[in-house]
Image: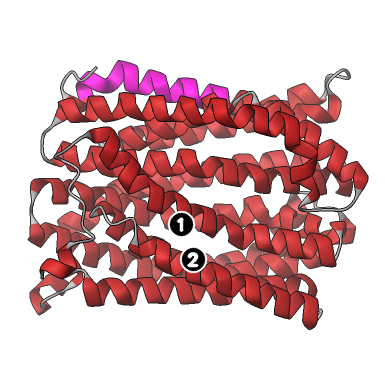
């Protein structure tokens, strides 16, 4: 039993910034490896198949994100509730939350995946995907839809483990599956010449290995996954709590995905060069997101455990330390992107027009990294508190911003195409300020006067 407890981290005691960093580092490495799924597909397809194939993959990104988001919000909600039970020290409720979240995550992703598979072509058509890449985009998206159940399986297992303070176990399986994905990508795309079909199949296989292995390991080694027959009962109250938080989180992620689809439609209207450049910059920004996302997830677990333990002063301290870490990283990244933008884009494509456009686009969005980080820091704290209203509010703000701002900016002749990337930064700023105001003005209601 003692060996099984070594990976569980109690964040209600000790130095907050040390705990947050200790928890974040394995999760950051894991998130970066997770991003390598898309990066490897994009690099190998872009370099060995061509810019059109890269654009086809990019055209599906916001759509597949929508369907993944519908499932992952439930897992995230279950993880937050589990972290709060962990802070209270209630083992029975921890196990019941793990089980009941699992029941929900067995059914929901299956339904979503089937619907997504058959809606692939109509949605891509609605987004005005360029005709020359439509066929490849539909095929790639349908393959990704098959993998929804496997992505959800991994996210469920990792959410439960992270709620218990274990950010290392998910990392190990992600590293293995990422290496497997790379090997399969090279085999299917470069050797067997399967184009984007090979890239998609490689990703789904790797996702399956990651999801099932992480869950089996947790069942074998983590004491909270050791269930008696009585622990397997359906609990209406706990399931309701998971859904009450998970559904708004799913809606938040889904609304953000819909807003990205709206932006993708604007991008598509500028042709395949713009789509390829936007795909490359989006892949790079997904990597930039990871330290912020990791910090937010760490703050969510930290806040959830301390909220359950009724230690509000530690929540305040964790929030301020999180802001400090975020600002330092944002300042560090700015000159790197400004100076080496073209070299970074060249990793993805050889086409010079795409490289020039992508490098300039990165320079624009890099000025807004602090606002992007602010979103994740505040969201992490509010999610840890179980503030389901904010999740929905944040999603609505993103949708309004991405529907209106890109159209307004691109219609200005002096800005034109570049309004796509200026709108990304402006929407980050609007969402960040909204999140900060939510924390600022509702903090007393949420956690009894914390500053």
Tell me which segment is drawn in magenta.
429-445
Q: Residue at x 70, y 71 (%)?
A: 199
> Which quadrant of the view contains residue 355?
top right
Residue 254, percent across and down?
Answer: 51, 47
Residue 65, percent across and down?
Answer: 57, 53
In terms of depth relative to the viewer, which is nearer, 108 or 24?
Answer: 24
| Quadrant location, the N terminus | bottom left
> Which quadrant of the view contains residue 320?
top left
Q: Which mark is residue 368?
A: none
Residue at the spot of label 2: 175
Q: In this view, does 34 lie above or below 260?
A: below
Give the SS element for disc 2.
Answer: helix
Q: Can residue 25 be seen in this view?
A: yes
Left or right, 352 with reference to 307: right
Determine the CA span between mark 1 and mark 2.
Answer: 7 Å
Residue 434 highlighted magenta (yes or no): yes
Residue at the spot of label 1: 30
Q: Can residue 70 be seen in this view?
A: no
Left or right, 149 with reference to 216: right
In terms of depth relative to the viewer, which is nearer, 192 or 132?
Answer: 192
Q: Which residue is drawn at 9% across and 59% down?
A: 91
């Amino acid at each position: 039993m003692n060996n099984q407890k070594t990976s569980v981290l109690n964040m209600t005691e000790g130095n907050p910034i040390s705990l947050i960093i200790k928890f974040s580092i394995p999760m950051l490495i894991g998130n970066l490896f997770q991003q390598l799924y898309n990066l490897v597909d994009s690099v190998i397809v872009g370099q060995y198949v061509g810019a059109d194939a890269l654009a086809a993959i990019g055209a599906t990104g916001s759509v597949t994100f929508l369907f993944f988001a519908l499932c992952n919000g439930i897992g995230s909600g279950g993880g937050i509730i589990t972290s709060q039970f962990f802070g209270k020290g209630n083992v029975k409720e921890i196990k019941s939350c793990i089980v009941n979240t699992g029941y929900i995550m067995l059914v929901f992703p299956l339904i979503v995946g089937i619907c997504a598979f058959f809606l692939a072509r109509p949605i891509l058509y609605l987004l005005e995907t360029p005709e020359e890449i439509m066929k490849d985009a539909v095929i790639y998206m349908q393959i990704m839809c098959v993998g929804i159940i496997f992505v959800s399986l991994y996210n469920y297992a990792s959410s439960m483990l992270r709620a218990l303070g274990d950010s290392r176990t998910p990392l190990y399986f992600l590293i293995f599956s990422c290496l497997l994905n790379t090997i399969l990508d090279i085999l299917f795309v470069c050797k067997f010449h399967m184009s984007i079909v090979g890239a998609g199949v490689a990703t789904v296989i790797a996702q399956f290995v990651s999801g099932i292995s992480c869950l089996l390991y947790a069942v074998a080694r983590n004491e909270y996954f050791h269930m008696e027959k009585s622990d397997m009962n359906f609990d209406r109250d706990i399931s309701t709590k998971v859904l009450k938080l998970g559904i708004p989180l799913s809606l938040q992620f889904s609304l953000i995905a819909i807003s990205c689809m709206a932006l993708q439609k604007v991008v598509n209207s500028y042709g395949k060069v713009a789509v390829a450049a936007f795909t490359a910059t989006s892949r790079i920004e997904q990597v930039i997101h990871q330290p912020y996302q990791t910090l937010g997830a760490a703050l969510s677990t930290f806040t959830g455990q301390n909220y359950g333990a009724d230690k509000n002063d530690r929540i305040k301290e964790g929030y301020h330390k999180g802001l400090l870490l975020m600002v330092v990283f944002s300042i560090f990244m700015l000159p790197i992107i400004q100076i080496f933008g073209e070299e970074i884009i060249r990793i993805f494509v050889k086409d010079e027009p795409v490289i020039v456009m992508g490098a300039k686009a990165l320079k624009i969005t890099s000025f807004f990294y602090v606002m992007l980080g602010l979103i994740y820091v505040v969201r992490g704290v509010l999610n840890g508190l179980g503030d389901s209203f904010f999740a929905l509010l944040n999603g609505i703000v993103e949708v309004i911003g991405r529907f209106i701002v890109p159209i307004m900016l691109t219609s200005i002749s002096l800005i034109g195409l570049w309004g796509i990337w200026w709108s990304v930064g402006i929407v980050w700023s609007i969402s960040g300020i909204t999140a900060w105001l939510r924390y600022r003005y509702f903090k007393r209601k949420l956690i009894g006067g914390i500053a």
